[in-house]
Amino acid sequence: MHRFLRPLSAAVFALPMLCATFASPARAETALGDVSGNWAGASGQGFVFRAVLTDEGGQARLRIWQGMDAASLQGEAQLDVAPVVYRDNIVAGDKQGLELAVGQDASTLKIVTDSDDEQYRFQETVSVQFLDFQFTVVAYDVIVTDFTDPAQSYACSVDLRANSRVVNGVAESLPPRGFEEDNLSSWGPDAALSKGLCPAPG
């Protein structure tokens, strides 16, 4: 079971956790994703950046370098977050990495996880843009599919810019919150639940 499910209803999601990992002390870092782009999208009017996702000791570590040109994408990263999302139960055949959606005026960096076992499929996407000089989470999506009892499946899609969410097909507004609360540097694997963006199923 994915670790995201631990804070959810124990009666609904009672399943031993998978323990396999890619990383070990002998192989401290495994590359998961490496993308480059311009935060202003196809217009090319923003900072260029490079994002790298790695597995380090069973944790998903995200680093982002940015600057005015490609030559500046070296040295110390402007963002270094570990863990940024859950990693320690990802097994061979599952997917975790980075994707880049490029629009005319903005690029969106996506941290994507897709894993399953005999009972559940866990799909998660954390979407990030560079807004007002901050690496900002602009959207969060999670789908938990219960193969044995589809009625217990769960979906939560959050638009953090519109401050709204759709939970199991029901649209809701979110309470106002400060812009800095969506900073990726303070996100982490439990953020959707701990920040009240996605509720635990009843």
Image (cartoon, rainbow, N blue to C red):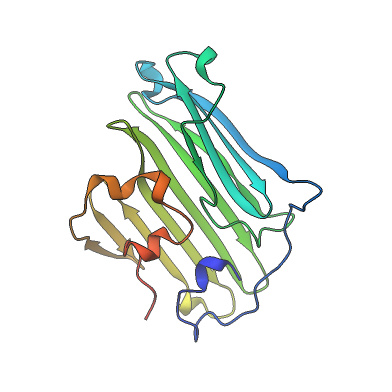
Q: Nearer the viewer, residue 145 or 49?
A: 49
Residue at the spot 56% in from the left edge and 67% down from the top edge: 3
Q: Position of residue 152 (x, y in %)?
A: 47, 78
Q: Residue at x 24, y 45 (%)?
A: 179
Q: Which sits in the foreground, 63 or 17?
A: 63
* Position in image of residue 173 (x %, y %): 20, 60
Q: Position of residue 25 (x, y in %)?
A: 77, 52
Q: Residue at x 55, y 62 (%)?
A: 122
Image quadrant for the N terminus?
bottom right
Q: Quadrant of residue 196?
A: bottom left
Q: Is residue 106 above or below residue 198?
A: above
Q: Nearer the viewer, residue 172 or 150?
A: 172
Residue closer to the observer: 81 or 138 = 81
Question: Furthest-left residue in view?
Answer: 176
Quarter holding the C terminus is bottom left
Indicate left or right for 57 with 100 as reference.
right
